[in-house]
Image: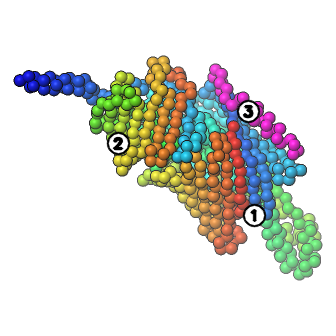
Amino acid sequence: MKRNICLILLLFCILVFSGSAFALTGQEVLEKMDQTLQVETSRIEMKMTLVNEDGLKRERTIEILTKGNNALVRFLHPMDVEGTALLLLEENDESDMWLYLPALGNVRKVASHMQNGSFMGSDFTYQDFNMFGGEKYQEAYQQTELNTTVYDETECYLLETLPTSEDRGYSKIRIWVDSTNFMALKLEFYDLQDNLLKVMTNSDILDLDGQLTPQMIVMENVQQNTRTILEMTDIKYNQTIPDQVFSTRNLEK
Amino acid sequence: MRKLWFPIVLALVLISCPLQAMELENFYLDSQGNINEKIIYNDTLTEWRNLLEVDLQINVDYGYSLSFYLNPEITFDTTLPDNTTVDLQLNEGFIDLYLDKMDLRLGKQLVNWGSAFKQNPTDRINPLDLTASDPTTQLGVRALKADYYLNRDTIISGVIVGEFIPGVLPESLQNSNIELLQHNIYQQVLALVQDQTTAEALMQNLSFQTTEPELKNIEDLEYAFKLTQRDFSGYDISLSFFSGYEDYPVLDSDLEQVIQNIVTSQPAAINFAYKRTNTIGLDMIGELQGVGLWAEAAFSLNEAEQKSLETLLGGDYTFENNLYTIVQYYYRDQLDDETKADQYVMVHGQLPLRQIHQLTTTLMYDLGAGSILLNPEVQYSLQNNLKLNLGGSYIANLKDTSSSLLGNYGSTQAYLGITYGF
């Protein structure tokens, strides 16, 4: 009898504690992640460092402006890439990407064959840059599994997701989410053969004007042994940015 | 002069460095540049050239409504150590004014129309400099450009050009054209006078001149319009009209009269002129089944009622290994002329090497003349902002035909350069 009571108590404890851990569904975690990142406007200047398989580093300076669901990524330095700009627009649940290359002098819609290719030599694809724009986790990813784990001494939700778009170029994405502030700490991207392709980590997370912001983002291609490091150098939130900045018209400026 | 170039370059770099990025309220100044030291071996001229190019870009933004841009370039030709020549060019220099629905640009500028790669039949405003290391380099013109946005995706553009700038042909090509014409005239004069010595003496009366258009009245100016519709069933479509002058001079003399003057010992001048021409263009770009596609067509009619048609079809694709490829087919037909149409196929590839270096190759095949042009280039990144460029162009006439469209795209040459960005 005593043994049975112990078993019942143990079962009760498991149910209670696992119940608290799974108080949220995967979809709710995704929603809370979106809420964490929600910002009216942002203007972030960052250093992009490309690290190749030999460990050689090359630096670029980029600026990302966001407003609502739209984003503009512009290269500021060096001169051979200066002015190159990518516009991410989301309207009526449809997203469009437009690219301006100063060498060609005209704006062009990013063709689908380019969207999963390397963006300006980095380990990010054009599609990956949607993460800095209006892409919502809850719309871009469909959660299939939810677990809890510890990552970098932080209690995390571990989400296994499928990209909702077939054109995303990944078979699945695993996301480690800080269970206290819902900031994604690590993302694993799997290729279409279901092999681990890239790992993205967000670190040095600071609260700036009430907005959680990773100071450093690293995207590592584990198959090619290359890395791209984004280090924030200047961050401004909720400043006035005119709507027309997010237009093909502005790309050529 | 030899001692002068170094302090000039140093001064430019020192002046621009502290100004590289300065931000005040609503005011943003940015300056960047490249210094490029280049050694070129031209196989056709069997000569070496040593060039130092300093390319600067200065940009001043005032809020979101006004900006200034300057792009001066200084070239020091240090081929002959005791006779360095300096060439200062303002590639572009303009003011931008952004109004509610209209963007205005005034000054020396490049107007890029057309969606194709490097060659754009619908882009008639800026002439080409075929003597440049990249023969698709365009020359800036002083112009006023206005883009009016009817809505987000519909744009009406208009350009008025305030000067006439001719296209630049390599001297060797100009001379060979004149020599060919001179030879033909000589043969006809010889046939008439039946004496070689007399024919040679009479040919002394022959002279050549080129007349540039005079822009006296407003109707003499070059102008162009374009209507663009973006994202029309997934395609960007433009319809354009250009009224201006041909980039290269054509024969503007009655050859029979010239020969008559020669044989009657009168002064005989052959005139070349830049014909006034009107061009209607159509341009579209989009994608089909994941492959980027574009097409351009331009129909021209000049003041001598000569018609020509230029068309271009192209596509691009990026492979999984990030190899970016372009395939283009070009066709040009002088519709009133019995000569064969010019046609070529171009294949272009760009492959990143170990993420920070790049291999670029362009292969052009002239379907009429059977000649090929190969342009390989390796960009090897030595350090941040420091690149080594090794490349060249190789032209071969597979069918041993002297006339080839690809002759316009440079000569067999090799170059080695080092570029420092600041």
Residue B326 is left or right of residue B212, and the answer is left
The secondary element bearing badge 2 is classed as strand
Badge 3 or badge 1: first in the primary sequence:
3
Percent coordinates x, y for residue B78 in the rendering: 82, 50
The kind of residue tagged 2 is Lys
Of B34 and B154, the residue lying toward us: B34
Confirm or deny contact between disc 3 and disc 2 (CB under 8 A): no
Asked if badges 3 and 1 are on one and the same chain, I answer yes
Q: Is residue B320 above or below residue A14?
A: below
The crowd level at tag 2 (other Cα within 10 Å; few <14, some 14-19, many 20+) is many
Of A83 and B5, the residue lying toward us: B5
Percent coordinates x, y for residue B341 in the rendering: 63, 66
Residue A191 visible:
yes
The kind of residue tagged 1 is Asp
Of B31 and B290, the residue lying toward us: B31
What residue sits 38% from the left and 23% below the top? A181
Quarter-of-image position of residue B397: bottom right
Determine the residue located farthest toward the bottom in the rendered image. B194
Asked if badges 1 and 2 are on one and the same chain, I answer no
Q: Chain of mark 2?
A: A
Tell me the quadrant of the picture where the C terminus of chain B can be found: top right
Q: Which mark is residue B380?
A: none
Percent coordinates x, y for residue A146 in the rendering: 28, 33
Q: Which mark is residue B43?
A: 1
Q: Is residue B125 above or below residue B393?
A: above
Q: Chain of mark 1?
A: B
Percent coordinates x, y for residue B318 in the rendering: 49, 52
Q: Which residues are magenta?
A: B1-28
**What is the tally of numbered marks visible in this picture?**
3
The kind of residue tagged 3 is Ser
